[in-house]
Amino acid sequence: MVTNAASFGRSGVHDFIMLRASAVVLACYTVFLVAFAAFSTPLTYEAWHGLFAALPMKVFTLLALIALLIHAWIGIWQVLTDYVKCVSLRGVLQFVFVVTAFAYLASGILIVWGV
Amino acid sequence: MELSEQNVKKQRPVHLDLQTIRFPATAIVSILHRVSGVIMLFAVGVLLWLLNASLKSPESFQYVQSLLDSFLLKFVVWGILTALGYHLLGGLRHLVMDTGRWEELASGKASAKAVFVLAIIFSILAGVWVW
């Protein structure tokens, strides 16, 4: 069996499912957040701060960032394996993007923690 | 010699007239889905920076609002929203195709064009909202 150490899941099928599951979470989060910002005009600090002070929104934000980590990991893997044929360069780029996504998650935790 | 080998070595007509080769709509939808996805991976960094500043204090919230008055940040936010809307629509098309629908040439092309039209409409709405 061919295994690929750089992909996210245990198999292609696992990646397929994880990509779609994370996409659903990200779609829900972005639609909600864009709608909230668009329909609360004018958007005040109180409303914005109040939204992120609520525990469900903190959880939702962190869920979205975990979904982003998974989604970006698999998506970047698909793009890099198609276009970057040099294995060492591809490995470095995959590393940089995955570390970036982890950094986003860590930042997100710290940002919503104290709100 | 294997039959498959014979087929490969057979002389085939080569068509490399770059003036007449066109990507079909389905291919353009696919590559733009990738491009918009990679763009948004960078965009999330900008968005997290804005989120952090907007939640810190009423003063820094004001500062973010004043930043959003500048053309540069308006343009960046509009670009992010356009990429997001396009990627979301392309993703929904993928989810429908996962169920076995829109997999024929005609329906695949039609749904690809529908994604373009809806993404452009969303991009214009996003532009109206931002400006």
Image (tube, coloured by chain):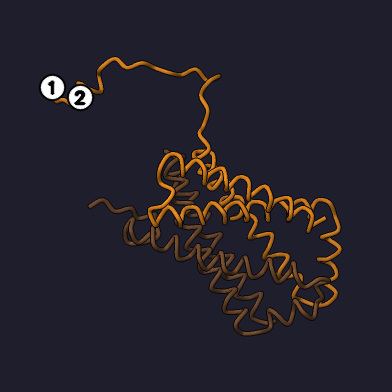
Depth order, front residue of B11/B43 = B11
Residue that mark 1 sits on: B1
Q: Position of residue A97 (x, y in %)?
A: 53, 55
Q: Is residue A72 left or right of residue A111?
A: left
Tell me what residue is drawn at x 64 percent, y 80 percent: A113
Residues at marks 2 and 1 on the same chain: yes
**Residue type (three-letter) at the residue carrying disc 1:** Met
- Give above or below for B124 relative to A103: above
Instruction: Name the disc covering residue B118, or none.
Output: none
Depth order, front residue of A20/B97 = B97
Residue that mark 2 sits on: B5
Residue B19: tell me if it is visible: yes
Q: Position of residue B126 (x, y in %)?
A: 73, 55
Dot 2 falls on a residue whose secondary structure is helix
Q: Is residue A72 left or right of residue B8?
A: right
Among the 4 quarters of the image, the one containing residue A107: bottom right
User: Mark 1 packing: few (<14 Cα in 10 Å), some, or many (20+)?
Assistant: few
Marks 2,1: beta carbons within 8 A: yes
Q: Please report, as a chain letter, where disc 1 is located.
A: B
**Residue type (three-letter) at the residue carrying disc 2:** Glu
Which quarter of the rendering shows the C terminus of chain B?
bottom right
- Colour for chain A in the figure: brown
- Give above or below for A61 relative to B71: below
Residue B61: tell me if it is visible: no
- Colour for chain B in the figure: orange
